Image (cartoon, rainbow, N blue to C red):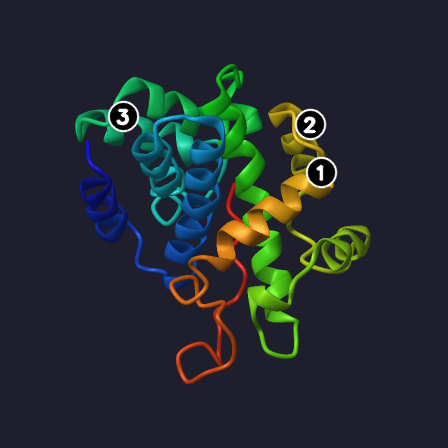
Amino acid sequence: MTRAEAWKIVCEFVQSESLRRHMLGVEACMVAYAKEFGEDEEQWAITALLHDFDWEIHPNAPDHPMKGEPILAGRGVDETTRRAILSHANYSGVTRDSRLERALFACDELTGFLTACSYVKPGRSIHEVDVSSVKRKLKDKAFARNVNREDIINGAQELGVPLEEHIGFCIEAMKTRAAELGLAGINAANRNAPALHEAG
């Protein structure tokens, strides 16, 4: 499967612009890590794009991603990618054994949190977000309360990257695609940015 084919699946199943942006944000972080680790960038991109493809049709656990996996299998998505997608849900019972699996889990919740941090900045831009402000927001339980802080902390640990470094790495990755993610700053396109997506 190519990245273009994966994106076609996303567009078929996902109508929410904020959810599509979430998946693109995870892709930005995953591709950056694939480059960093010398891994297969396209496979990591495909896994990131498809990890929440069934969220709108299976909004409840454990249907997501368990019921989505057979759909992906039927579309020709390889087992490595499908297993990684299953493993990003703690309740799936699928352990995170590969670097791909650990990276997806590490990037998923953090991407959503960094998006939320961007939206509360004066310019609503990822370029205004820094590691220290993100760490302060992580301690504020009232902020983006549906984002699982334990998953963010545990994700970095599983990936073997210090939390501060992981946050900084993902901020920089998202900056490279800020316009596509709606995080380039206030303008006509994103002045009324959608609510934070907090899928698993």
Percent position of residue 48, x then y: 40, 39
Q: Name the residue carrying label 3.
A: 70
Assess disc 3: are there few (<14), some (14-19) or many (≥20) residues with their C-alpha within 10 Å of its C-alpha: few
Q: Earlier in the sequence, mark 1 or mark 2?
A: 2
Look at the numbered disc 3 and give the secondary structure of its residue.
Answer: helix
Q: Earlier in the sequence, mark 1 or mark 3?
A: 3
Figure check: 190 above or below 164: below
Percent position of residue 69, x then y: 32, 27
Q: Earlier in the sequence, mark 2 or mark 3?
A: 3
Q: Residue at x 41, y 40 (%)?
A: 31
Q: Residue at x 59, y 69 (%)?
A: 119
Q: Point out the image quarter for the N terminus.
A: top left
Of 32 and 78, nearer the camera is: 32
Look at the numbered disc 2 and give the secondary structure of its residue.
Answer: helix
Of 146 and 35, nearer the camera is: 35
Q: Name the residue carrying label 1.
A: 163
Q: Nearer the viewer, mark 1 or mark 3?
A: 1
Q: Is residue 65 left or right of residue 120?
A: left
Q: Amino acid at mark 2?
A: Gln
The label on residue 46 is none
Assess disc 2: are there few (<14), some (14-19) or many (≥20) residues with their C-alpha within 10 Å of its C-alpha: some
Give yes or no for contact between labels 2 and 3 (Cβ–Cβ under 8 Å).
Answer: no
Label total for image: 3
Q: Is residue 78 left or right of residue 23?
A: left
Percent position of residue 17, x then y: 37, 63
Q: Nearer the viewer, mark 2 or mark 3?
A: 2
Q: Amino acid at mark 3?
A: Pro
Of 56 and 100, nearer the camera is: 100
Q: Name the residue carrying label 2.
A: 157
Q: Find the residue positioned furthest to the bottom.
A: 188
Q: CA distance from mark 1 to mark 3?
A: 34 Å
